[in-house]
Amino acid sequence: MPAPLLMVMATLLFATMGVCVKLASEFYAASEIVMYRGLVGMTAMALMCRQQGLTLKTRVPGMHLWRSISGVTSLCLWFYAIGKLPLATAMTLNYMSSVWMALFLLGGAVLMGAQKLDWRLMASVLLGFVGVALILRPTVDEQQLWHGLAGLLSGMLAAMAYLQVTALGRAGEPELRVVFYFSAGGAIAGALVTAVTEGGLQHHTPWGAALLLAVGLLATAAQVCLTRAYSIGRPLVNACLQYLGIVFSFIYGMLLFKDPLTWLAAIGMLLIIGAGIAATLLRAKVAPPPKDSQFNPNES
């Protein structure tokens, strides 16, 4: 399956997971939801690895460690920002990850003196962010500056995590193994935060347990698609398509939670879709990556 289609599928799955998280948040703390999401992901990945004859042993444990640290820290900072800022503001600051990614790649090209970036592709990323801003219309008060910086840092760390996923794919790491170790990091961090800040786990109801299971399964499937896409695709193209998650979330909000649709939001959705299409078309005009950087899903 091509990387653009994988990213579209990942954004839809993540948006659906967001609905389940919104419903589950009535019964569980955010850290507990993160913990169960990680546990479900670990179990699913371990079973899939066994079915496909893959081992969880890795030759690059350090790369997995840094990917987990950056990804889980980004997630924790994002949840912190959501708790302290208006949701629209926290969401937008986290979606700055694509802009951070463009800046990282540009800085790397300048330092290495060998890589040439497509400025049209970078413009697509910025266009997509304009669409996010129109939909969410964020505001930050002076008293919320530190919380806003936490949200901004979450976006920067998310960009680092995505680039590390790309590096892991080029190192020959199967996406199942990458997602397993990221899920393990989320489970450990979620458990520690829950024990320290919440005083322990909540009691389950059938509905609550079903929501937690859905969150874990949807997140795991989405993470596999995202990992695969970043391993075989171009990071900036994936960054553009990732904005579609806002569109899917807005649609869910209107259908399930009666969220209003404004003209600015409609224009923002069009800009996001346009940025994704432009990035996909630009990707089709470039040559595929060298053979030695291709992702090998069968390597164990």
Image: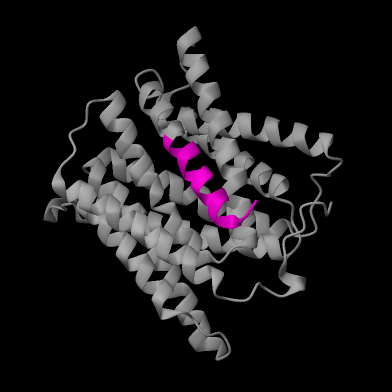
Q: Residue 194, image x and y in percent?
A: 47, 29
Q: Residue 190, image x and y in percent?
A: 51, 35
Residue 12 painted magenta: yes
The residue lying furthest to the top in this view is 206
Residue 97 lies left or right of residue 93; in this view the side is right
Q: Main secondary structure of the magenta part?
A: helix
**Residues rendered magenta in the picture:** 1-15
Q: Residue 281, image x and y in percent?
A: 48, 67
Instruction: Look at the image and tell me whether residue 184 can be seen.
Output: yes
Picture quarter containing residue 179?
top right
The residue lying furthest to the bottom in this view is 113
Please name the residue shown 83% across and 44% down the image: 54
Residue toward you, 123 or 104: 123
Picture quarter containing residue 156?
bottom left
Residue toward you, 226 or 40: 226
Residue 114 lies left or right of residue 204; in this view the side is right
Indicate whether 281 appears above or below 182.
below
Indicate whether 252 appears above or below 54.
above
Please name the residue shown 57% across and 49% down the image: 6
Q: Residue 143, image x and y in percent?
A: 14, 52
